[in-house]
């Protein structure tokens, strides 16, 4: 394996310079990696626009962040429910009305391991609709401002991209047949990653080198993910895995690296480089080729435009 370019401890937030004047938009900050990422960005003097679905939780999060980082910190929340396209569109418009630049959009929020086959209000399987189509539309609508800001898009994927069926189930995208929580979650995370590499190709083709797009994952981190949407059995299984996991703070490092590190190679996949990529020093690591299957990515992109009715202005 190649040596970690950030040394034996990997990338850490000590590498982040002062972020005064920079604006970060981040989804899902009420807990887990999103909360930790927001906290570190604020501690480096960035402005943070949080996008959360639950206004009360968001208000409490702001209070906690101000307690922990200081009352001066520049943080606000805009309500966004990724599982509803109307909410995503409304939130994107509000972001555009509120900030004049986006240095990085961090697509962190997700649900996982939903026990029962359910559809979103827009008619998609819940994980695909929330994790994939929700982020797809948000990214597309914020893209013009990100482009104007020479900014970045960071997608928080999962090692789940390499579980399940390892491709996109175009003939049954909603899992009407053979639904399993893990297969559907894994597909949604694979789709998120694939669309980042497809976006890179499209930006390159359009000669746009000022916007960067990155894919990363938090390894196995102790967050609320499984407690929020997983079954009792899944919660128990994750409880047993606890000794092999890392803190939510460490889980935030890959997304922070992708949002702030200068000259980071976009073609990489970033996360913990230790055991099974669950824990360990953060850096680039192997990505299996199915995540960059160009025919599948292109088809998924075109399908996403059709399904959401949203087109990227690249
Ligand atoms: N933890 C891990 O080991 C692990 C492993 C692989 C990948 N990941 C990925 O890491 C990212 C962060 O997850 P986490 O582990 O930190 O989980 P978490 O603690 O559950 O945080 C998830 C965040 O997403 C928000 N969210 C959920 N559904 C939403 C929706 N419909 N609209 C807007 N926000 C929504 C949650 O808000 P509420 O408070 O309202 O629920 C919460 O703020 C996810 O993309 C996940 O797939 C995590």
Image (spheres, grey):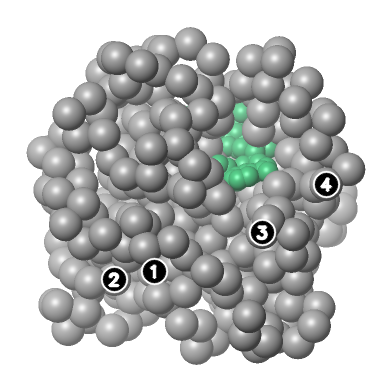
Residue under the point 16% across and 57% down? 295
Residue 213 marker: 1
The quadrant of the picture occupied by the C terminus is bottom left
Residue 15: which quarter of the image? bottom right
Indicate left or right for 252 with 269 as reference.
Answer: right
Do the residues bearing badges 2 and 1 touch, measured as CB atoms within 8 Å? yes
Disc 2 target residue: 200
Do the residues bearing badges 2 and 4 touch, measured as CB atoms within 8 Å? no
Do the residues bearing badges 2 and 3 touch, measured as CB atoms within 8 Å? no
Front tag of 3 and 1: 3
Disc 2/disc 3 C-alpha distance (Å)? 24 Å
| Residue 294 image offset from top left, x and y in percent | 21, 62
Front tag of 4 and 1: 4
Disc 3 target residue: 277
Nearest to N terminus: mark 2 or mark 3: 2
Nearest to N terminus: mark 3 or mark 1: 1
| Residue 293 image offset from top left, x and y in percent | 26, 59
Vertically, is 246 above or below 213? above
């Amino acid at each position: 394996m190649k040596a970690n370019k950030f040394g034996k401890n990997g990338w850490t937030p000590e590498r982040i310079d002062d972020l005064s004047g920079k604006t970060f938009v981040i989804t899902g900050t009420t807990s887990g990696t999103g909360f930790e990422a927001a906290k570190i960005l604020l501690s480096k003097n960035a402005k943070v626009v949080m996008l959360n679905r639950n206004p009360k939780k968001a208000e409490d999060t702001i209070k906690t962040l101000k307690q922990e980082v200081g009352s001066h910190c520049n943080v606000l929340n805009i309500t966004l429910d990724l599982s509803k396209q109307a909410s995503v569109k409304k939130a994107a418009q509000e972001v555009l009305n509120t900030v004049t630049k986006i240095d990085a959009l961090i697509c962190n929020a997700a649900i996982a391991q939903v026990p029962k086959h359910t559809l979103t209000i827009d008619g998609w399987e819940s994980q695909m609709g929330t994790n994939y189509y929700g982020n797809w539309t948000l990214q597309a609508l914020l893209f013009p401002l990100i482009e104007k800001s020479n900014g970045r898009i960071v997608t928080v994927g999962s090692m789940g991209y390499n579980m399940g069926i390892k491709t996109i189930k175009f003939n049954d995208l909603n899992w009407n047949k053979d639904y399993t929580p893990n297969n559907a979650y894994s597909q949604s995370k694979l789709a998120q990653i694939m669309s980042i590499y497809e976006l890179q190709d499209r930006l390159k083709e359009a000669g746009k080198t000022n916007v960067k797009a990155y894919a990363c994952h938090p390894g196995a981190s102790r967050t609320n993910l499984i407690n929020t949407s997983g079954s009792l059995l899944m919660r128990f299984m994750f409880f047993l895995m606890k000794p092999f996991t890392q803190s939510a703070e460490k889980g935030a490092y890959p997304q922070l690296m992708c949002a702030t590190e200068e000259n980071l190679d976009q073609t990489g996949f970033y996360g913990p480089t230790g055991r099974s990529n669950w824990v360990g020093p953060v850096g680039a690591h192997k990505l299996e080729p199915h995540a960059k299957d160009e025919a599948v990515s292109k088809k998924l992109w075109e399908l996403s435009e059709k399904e959401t009715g949203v087109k990227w202005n690249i």
